[in-house]
C-alpha cells in the first residue's frame, strides 16, 4: 500500500479516479482507497498523515523529493492514454511519453499535490490475467 498525503482529499480522489480509470473506495470520509493490480493507493489528508507520524513532521514539501511513483502499462498506447487522462485531470506533464534508453516507452507527470509519476511500458513487462506485472528479464 502506498499512502499519499494530499491537500484536498475530494479533489485528489476525483483526479486519481480519472487518471487510473478505476472507482475508488470512498466508504470513509477520512481516506480514499484505490485498489490496483498488486498494490493499493491510499489518499489521506497531508496534515493528518504528518500528525499520524509525529507532531513534529512538517507538512511543507520541496519541489522534488527524489522519489517517483510509477504506473506500468501493458502497451505504448496505454501509456499515451494514461498521460492524456492525467493532463485532462489537471496534472502537469513534465516529460511527454517517448521511447527510452532502456528500450521502453515512458513519460512523467506531476499530480495535484506535487508527486512525480512515471507511466511506463517495457518489452520486458509481462502481466498475468489479474493485471499483476512481472519482469520477463532483468537488465
Image: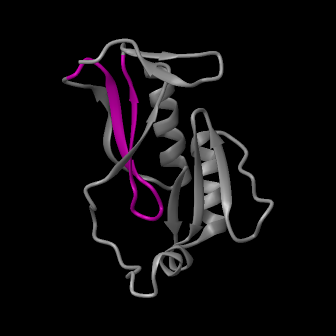
Residue drawn 52% across the image and 68% down it: 6
| Residue lying at the far bottom of the rendered structure | 55
Residue drawn 53% across the image and 48% down it: 88
Would residue 112 be counted in the magenta stretch? yes
Residue 70, x across and y down, in percent: 41, 40
Q: How is the image coloured?
A: one colour
Residue 19 vs residue 27: left or right? left
Q: Closer to the camera, 46 or 10?
A: 46
Residue drawn 45% across the image and 65% down it: 113
First to last magenta residue range: 102-122
Residue 98, x across and y down, in percent: 30, 28
The quadrant the C terminus occupies is top left
Residue 33, x across and y down, in percent: 67, 54
Instruction: Determine whether 42 is above or below 6 in the image.
Output: above
Residue 47, x across and y down, in percent: 52, 80
Q: Closer to the camera, 23 or 135?
A: 135
Would residue 117 be counted in the magenta stretch? yes
Q: Closer to the camera, 126 or 113?
A: 126
Instruction: Determine whether 67 is above or below 54 in the image.
Output: above
Instruction: Determine whether 76 is above or below 109 in the image.
Output: above
Amino acid at each position: 500500500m502506498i499512502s499519499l498525503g494530499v491537500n484536498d482529499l475530494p479533489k485528489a480522489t476525483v483526479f486519481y479516479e480519472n487518471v487510473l480509470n478505476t472507482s475508488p473506495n470512498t466508504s470513509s470520509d477520512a481516506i480514499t482507497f484505490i485498489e490496483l493490480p498488486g498494490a493499493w493507493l491510499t489518499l489521506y489528508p497531508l496534515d493528518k498523515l504528518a500528525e499520524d507520524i509525529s507532531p513534529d513532521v512538517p507538512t511543507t514539501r520541496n519541489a522534488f523529493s527524489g522519489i517517483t511513483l510509477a504506473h506500468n502499462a501493458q502497451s505504448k498506447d496505454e501509456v499515451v492514454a494514461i498521460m492524456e487522462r492525467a493532463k485532462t485531470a489537471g496534472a502537469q506533464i513534465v516529460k511527454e511519453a517517448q521511447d527510452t534508453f532502456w528500450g521502453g516507452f515512458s513519460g512523467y507527470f506531476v499530480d495535484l499535490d506535487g508527486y512525480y509519476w512515471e507511466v511506463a511500458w517495457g518489452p520486458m513487462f509481462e502481466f498475468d490475467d489479474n493485471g499483476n506485472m512481472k519482469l520477463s528479464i532483468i537488465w
